[in-house]
Image: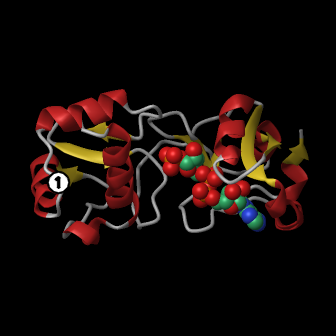
Amino acid sequence: MDVVRVSKRLSFVLRHQPASIGLTLDEAGWVDVDRLLGALAAHGLPLSRQDLDDVVAGNDKQRFAYDGSGTRIRASQGHSVAVDLGYAPAAPPAELFHGTVERFLPSILAEGLRPGRRHAVHLSEDRATAHTVGGRRGKPVVLRVDAARLAADGAQFAVSANGVWLVAAVPPAYLELT
Ligand code: HQG
């Protein structure tokens, strides 16, 4: 099994296009594991439950999570389909980081960070992770977010099951180039 390939396919299905293999997610993003395995097999990706367990457990960013009983699975963040993941509001660390690339800076510094097609802006607790996130698109640039002040000014933060900080938007006044 090619774990990275399976993980990418799962991200696509569980975050963006469940209908591509005939699935719908519930309102919190969960899908029944047996139905997922059946649908993947019917669309050219036969996996055992053990294979899926290995992808969930071994995923470098812990992108997927089972529910308590292990009968359902979802992506922990990154959706473009409408789901309410139900994460409780949480107080963020004083500063958070966002990795991007230089070509986006004029727009980001003018209008702030926007979620684009995802539900929330994704922020990292450490600079190294933000650097990696930015590096997906080219030479990374890391922005520091004054999360303490943004929270004090009323923004609601949440942290996903896999440690990604989520917020609706970050206005430019809370951003600083590092
Ligand atoms: C940029 C991956 C112009 C933003 C990663 C980013 C992450 C703006 C891109 C997760 C902007 C959106 C999310 C503005 C933001 N003007 N550009 N106003 N505001 N941008 O992929 O944060 O591997 O939706 O800087 O590791 O890059 O998929 O967000 O470059 O955790 O699990 O618009 O995706 O995780 O891109 O990445 P994305 P992201 P996975």
Asked whether 140 or 63 is in front, the reply is 140
Instruction: Please state, as top left, top right, bottom left or bottom right, where the C terminus lies in the image.
Output: top right
Please say whether residue 168 is visible from this viewpoint.
Answer: no
Which residue appears farthest toward the front when viewing the image? 2
Please say whether residue 53 is visible from this viewpoint.
Answer: yes
Q: Is residue 169 above or below residue 49?
A: below
Residue 50 location (% of width, % of height) = 15, 32
The picture quadrant where one finds residue 2 is top left
Name the residue: 73% across, 36% down: 96
Asked whether 120 or 38 is in front, the reply is 38
In the picture, measured across the screen, residue 45 lies left or right of residue 135, that is: left
Residue 166 location (% of width, % of height) = 59, 47
The picture quadrant where one finds residue 107 is bottom right
Name the residue: 32% across, 38% down: 3
Name the residue: 11% across, 39% down: 48
Amino acid type assigned to the residue bearing label 1 in the image = Leu
